[in-house]
Amino acid sequence: MLETLGNAPLPVVILVSGRGSNLEALIAARDRGLPIAILAVICDHADAPALALARAQSIPTQVLSKAAHPDRTDYDAALARMIDALHPRLIVLAGFMRLLSTDFVNRYLGKLINIHPSLLPAFPGLHTHRRALEARVKEHGASVHFVIPAMDAGPIVSQVRVPVLANDTADTLAQRVLSQEHRLYPATLRLLWEARVQWHQGRVLFDGQVLESPLQLTAAENDHFI
């Protein structure tokens, strides 16, 4: 369980694989006053644009490539050593495109969060926007959840909803969802810093009570949850 830190920022490590748009949103939110301290950005691809983005902001970066640790168990053990040396309170997955082992996830249970581009439990895994269009849903969106060993199945903290338009393609829908992810992730991290959202025995607490359904981010610009 994450305890209140008073006025101190929440120390986080951010794991990325690609362009880093959610990382960019978190950095921008930090610069606007989100109380997080980004201890490092760890990436599994040495040429990922996210690394250049972090370095431009003087954020320490580390690269852990699959080539250096082709065995999944060895990779996750090396990743855990990197993380433990930094002593974060929270590990933030921001487009980290690796399946993490059960041992790794259990090591950080309750301190590992992810953002997923669908309204979980709908459309776990990949190609969520195409699948949403194929299913002809009227609403799509994104979810922030605590990570458990089962993929995209952890307790959901928060969501943001995006209407599906008649002329949407997977690309146009993805763009609109991503823009809302950039609001959802910082707003959720603020709740974690405030200790209003906590992990407790496999469930999410909100203001000390079990959260029965995900918090919903409104369409307003003040990033208010209902």
Image (cartoon, helix red, strand yellow):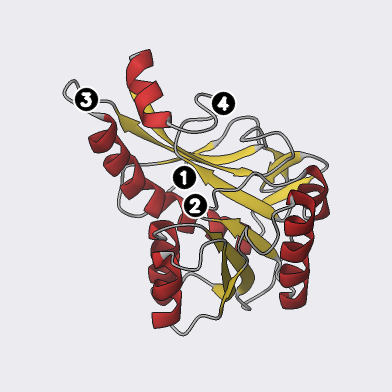
**How would you rate the neighbour count of disc 1 (Cα within 10 Å): few for under 14, some for 14-19, many for 20 or more?**
some
> Would you say 48 lies left or right of 125 here?
left
Label 2 to label 1: alpha-carbon separation: 23 Å
Residue 141 placement, left or right of 85? left
Q: Earlier in the sequence, mark 2 or mark 1?
A: 2
> Residue 165 bears which disc, if any?
3
What residue did someone put label 2 on? 95
- Residue at position x 44%, y 57% in the image: 18
**Quadrant of res 140:** top left
The residues bearing labels 1 and 3 have C-alpha atoms spaced at a distance of 24 Å
Of mark 4 and mark 1, the one earlier in the sequence is 4
User: Which mark, residue 208?
Assistant: none
Whole-percent x, y for residue 9 in the image: 60, 75
Disc marking residue 225: 1
Check if mark 2's residue and mark 4's residue have beta carbons within 8 Å. no
How far separated are the C-alphas under marks 4 and 3? 21 Å
**In the image, which disc is placed on residue 121?**
4
Residue appearing at x 70%, y 44% in the figure: 205
Q: Earlier in the sequence, mark 4 or mark 3?
A: 4
Q: Position of residue 39 (x, y in %)?
A: 61, 77
* Amino acid type, residue under disc 3 in the picture: Leu
Where is residue 96 shown, x and y percent of the image? 55, 53
